[in-house]
Amino acid sequence: MSITYFDALNPFWWLSVGITLFQVFVFVDAAIRREDAYRAADKKTKGFWLVLLGVALGIDLIFGANFIGSFLTLAGLVAAIVYMVDVRPAIKAITGGRGGKGGSNRNTGPYGPW
């Protein structure tokens, strides 16, 4: 698949690329978060979010992110937005902003952050 001159000038093409990149970011973010943080935040499980976001991303990669006429693209975009505005902040508040297993304790002294 090559990008033609007309694709680069088409704003709908750029919106489709933006939607796909946003869904990639959300899926990777959901994958690196700890599984127990989802339960602690009283959100759905990590597997639920990975399946939901992965199916939405897969459909957009296979069929193209056509947000004008595709109900599945809009549903996947809504799922990604819900994750970003609801689930991700709750998980970041529990994990202290770190996603992985523990993370580093940079800029923390014996009595807390400095």
Image (cartoon, helix red, strand yellow):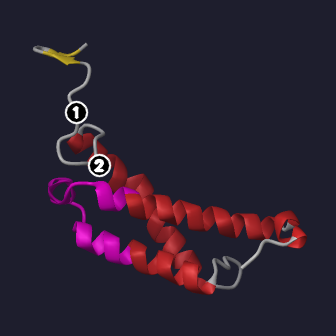
Please give left or right for residue 92 compared with residue 60 in the image.
left
- For the point 43% across and 53% down, the residue is 85
> Which amino acid lies under the numbered mark 2 shown in the image of this protein?
Ala
Q: Going by the image, does 62 lie left or right of 83?
A: right
Determine crowd level at label 2: few under 14, some 14-19, many 20+ residues with C-alpha closer than 10 A: many
Residue 24 position within the rendered picture, expressed as x and y whole percent measured from the top left? 49, 64
Observer-nearest residue: 72 or 3? 3
Which quadrant of the structure image shows residue 46? bottom left
| Label 1 neighbour load within 10 Å: few <14, some 14-19, many 20+ | few
Q: Say which label, 2 or 1, has the lower sequence index.
A: 2
- Of badges 2 and 1, the one in the foreground is 1
Magenta span dominant secondary structure: helix
Can you tell which quarter of the image residue 83 is in? bottom left
Tell me if 74 is positioned left or right of 101 in this view.
right
Q: Label 2, on which residue?
A: 90
Q: Secondary structure at mark 2?
A: helix
Q: Where's the C terminus, which quadrant?
A: top left
Residue 101, image x and y in percent? 18, 47
Q: Nearer the viewer, residue 19 or 43?
A: 19
Instruction: Find residue 98 and report its image quarter.
Output: top left
101 in relation to 18, above or below: above
Asked whether the viewer can see residue 82, the reply is no
Please give the name of the residue rendered at 57% of the width and 76% of the height, measured from the top-left corner: 74
Give the distance between the C-alpha atoms of the residues marked 2 and 1, in whole angstroms: 20 Å
Question: What residue sits right under mark 1 in the picture?
Answer: 104
Say what secondary structure mark 1 lies in.
Answer: loop
Q: Is 62 part of what is drawn in magenta?
A: no
Tell me which residue sits at (21%, 55%) in the image. 34
Q: For the magenta stretch, what is the residue range?
A: 29-52
Q: Is residue 24 left or right of residue 95?
A: right
Q: Position of residue 72 (x, y in %)?
A: 54, 84
